[in-house]
Image (tube, helix red, strand yellow):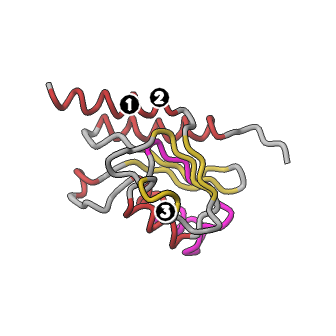
């Protein structure tokens, strides 16, 4: 099936969410979940606002997508997230049985990639490096502004 959208299109949507997070002084991570070429969930980090260390963009998006679908499993869905998921989010994504994860920039300190892809469900396809420079730049700018 030929679709008008591609990974870069949906990553741009995730970047818009990350920019919303930055505007709220949250770590700028954004996520969207897509099913049948349609965004069914979008979110960004809410850890500061909610005072909840588990309120990562991915977790918030998983919850919204599950509510939208009326199901706990996200088979047939793709997550687009600006930064590589952490171990906690990888675990949640494992249990969601999501089909595909696409992330922009790696997180060398906290990313699940340090453990290869063993933390993701065996059927989940993981793609990285989509709009990597843009995703990394937003994160770098955010943390540089905190160091001033």
Element type at marker 2? helix
Q: In the figure, is residue 3 to the left or right of 19?
A: right
In the rendered image, residue 15 lying in the magenta stretch gets the answer no
On the rendered image, what quadrant is the C terminus found in? top left
The reply to whether callout 2 and callout 1 are in contact (CB within 8 Å) is: yes
Looking at the image, is mark 2 or mark 3 earlier in the sequence?
A: 3
Residue placed under numbered mark 1 in the picture = 138
Furthest residue toward top? 148
- Percent across and percent down for residue 119 are 48, 65
Q: Residue 134: which numbered mark, if any? A: 2
In the rendered image, residue 80 lying in the magenta stretch gets the answer yes
- Between 112 and 143, the one nearer to me in the picture: 112
- Between 122 and 63, the one nearer to me in the picture: 122
Q: Which residues are magenta?
A: 63-83
Where residue 56 sits, quadrant-wise, is bottom left
Residue placed under numbered mark 3 in the picture = 62
Label 2 neighbourhood size at 10 Å, few (<14), some (14-19), many (20+)?
some
Element type at marker 1? helix
């Amino acid at each position: 099936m030929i679709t008008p959208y591609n990974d870069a299109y949906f990553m741009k949507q995730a970047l818009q969410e990350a920019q919303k997070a930055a505007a709220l002084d949250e770590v700028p991570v954004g996520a969207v979940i897509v099913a049948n070429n349609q965004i069914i969930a979008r979110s960004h980090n809410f850890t500061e606002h909610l005072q909840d260390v588990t309120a990562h963009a991915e977790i918030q998006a998983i919850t919204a997508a599950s509510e939208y679908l009326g199901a706990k499993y996200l088979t047939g869905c793709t997550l687009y997230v600006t930064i590589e998921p952490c171990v906690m989010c990888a675990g949640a994504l494992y249990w969601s049985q999501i089909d595909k994860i696409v992330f922009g920039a790696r997180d060398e300190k906290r990313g699940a990639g340090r453990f290869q892809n063993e933390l993701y469900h065996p059927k989940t396809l993981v793609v990285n490096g989509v709009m990597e420079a843009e995703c990394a730049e937003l994160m770098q700018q955010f943390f540089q502004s905190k160091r001033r």
